[in-house]
Amino acid sequence: MPRVLDVNRRAAPHRSLFSLILVLTLLASSCAGRRSGSDEATQRLRDALIDGPARSVVLLIGDGMGDSEITLARNYSAGAAGRLEMDALPLTGSYTTYAVQEAEPYLPDYVVDSAASATAWATGHKTSNGRLSTAAGSDEPLQTIAELVQQKGLLVGSVTTADLTDATPAALVSHVNSRRCQGPRDMGQCPNRRKAAGGPGSIAEQAIDHAVDVLLGGGKARFDQPIDAGPDAGRTVIESAVRQGYTVVTDAGGLAASTPGAKLLGLFAAGDMSAEWSGARAVTYPGSGPQRCKEGQRPAAEPSLATMARKALDLLDERAASRGFFLQIEGASIDKQDHAANPCGQIGETVAFDAAVRVVLDYAAAHPDTLVIVTADHAHSSQIVPEPLLYGYGGLSPGLLSTLITADGSTMTVSYATAAPFGVQTHTGTQVRVAAQGPGAADIVGVIDQTALFHTMARALGLPTSVRSTKP
Ligand code: MG
Ligand code: ZN
């Protein structure tokens, strides 16, 4: 060993001079690069800080799209060094998502469901899991951003890949103690909200009675149920919608042919809309795969989320004229496929959501007075873990596993371990990413709570925000 060192030392004079020049050259160029890079980044950030007001707000929600779900979709579809469309938003923060307990609303419930979560940004208030825009304990209705937007004379739209009566869209347009009360025949958990009991009716009825300008998604079976009392007694919710001035479409062709004018109700599936991709579900050790996902699984008669988003933007933009609008766009089945431990389904829905983000960013490029927010309602199960067979017993996970072949040409293992192998995977309680651009977007930087989003959106649209603090 000493001899080897001697040899190295003898070679040192020439080499060290060369090395010194090399190091100095690299250092100089890297410093220069860093300086200009840093200046550019600072300028980009300055350019991204835009005061309100905004003409319109578009809120994109990836249901269950925590950092793991984003990273999985990026690795699979763009490669580890690639970037998704949603990664392009210039301002990012994280937000906390906890709910509160029904019996003791001053105590947190650390794992939120989509109902309490959507209530938080829709109303600025925490509530307990399962509730939609009603207060934990008191059952008091909480005014929603959609209602405030309408009071100001702006338009409202809601787009989802789930039932339009599912929790995330429902929180905008209904006040119910239970998210299960989706159609007039689903009122077992909320009998006093039936129209026959003098209440506002099911979520489907409330959505239509709220006169939302554009409603696009699944859940036709809920809207096919008959109403039990009031001016539309005996009519289905769809018939009630028609009576109240809606045009109803049920497939991609009908959507494409819709023109601004009447309010639009698009119901493209009996329940949830079809998943974009399929593949083998995760199973116990050593898991399924290695697999590549089967893309293009959605029937052509069902529009994609991106197609629905584009149509909603066109219709709202045209109808709103100078007034502006609020549009919520939900990629709902990232969550549902995560519950099912189906990595291909989950990634396909995340990629489809990302395509809708692209549509919105294109719209915002032409309409810079638009505040665009991209976030999730809660985190979920999936985790990127070491490949089980490479790591042997070190990679022996108690969860369900699947190995995917990514855009990098490499393998990536996904684990689902929030439920027993035969159970349904569940949400998790970690903070999630919030990203934004446009007037008022700086509000989301740092660590915030998801109730703050209500105030961010309300401020941007010039709505009254005197409504209590952002604390639960
Ligand atoms: Mg949802
Ligand atoms: Zn869920």
Image (cartoon, helix red, strand yellow):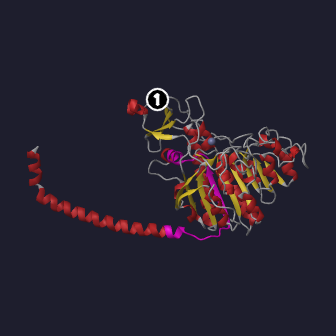
Would you place residue 151 above or below residue 158 in this image?
below
User: Which of 221 and 253 lies nearest the eye of the viewer?
Assistant: 221
Residue 49 is a magenta residue: yes
**In this picture, which residue range is highlighted in magenta?**
45-73
Measured as percent of width and height from the top left, residue 240 is found at: 86, 49
Q: Residue at x 42, y 33 (%)?
A: 395
Q: Is residue 348 left or right of residue 259?
A: left
Would you place residue 143 above or below residue 74 in this image?
below
Q: Residue at x 66, y 44 (%)?
A: 129
Measured as percent of width and height from the top left, residue 199 is found at: 84, 48
Q: Amino acid at mark 1?
A: Pro
User: Which of 209 and 38 lies nearest the eye of the viewer?
Assistant: 209
Q: Which quadrant of the figure has residue 190? A: top right
Q: Is residue 270 left or right of residue 341?
A: right
Q: Quadrant of the C terminus?
A: bottom right
User: Which of 165 and 406 lies nearest the eye of the viewer?
Assistant: 165
User: Which of 152 and 132 lies nearest the eye of the viewer?
Assistant: 132
Q: Is residue 71 left or right of residue 260?
A: left
Would you place residue 399 above or below residue 378 in this image?
above
Q: Which residue is mark 1?
A: 286
Q: Residue 304, can we see it? A: no
Measured as percent of width and height from the top left, residue 46 is found at: 50, 70
Secondary element at tag 1? loop
Callout 1: 10 Å neighbours few (<14), some, many (20+)? some
Q: Quadrant of the N terminus?
A: top left
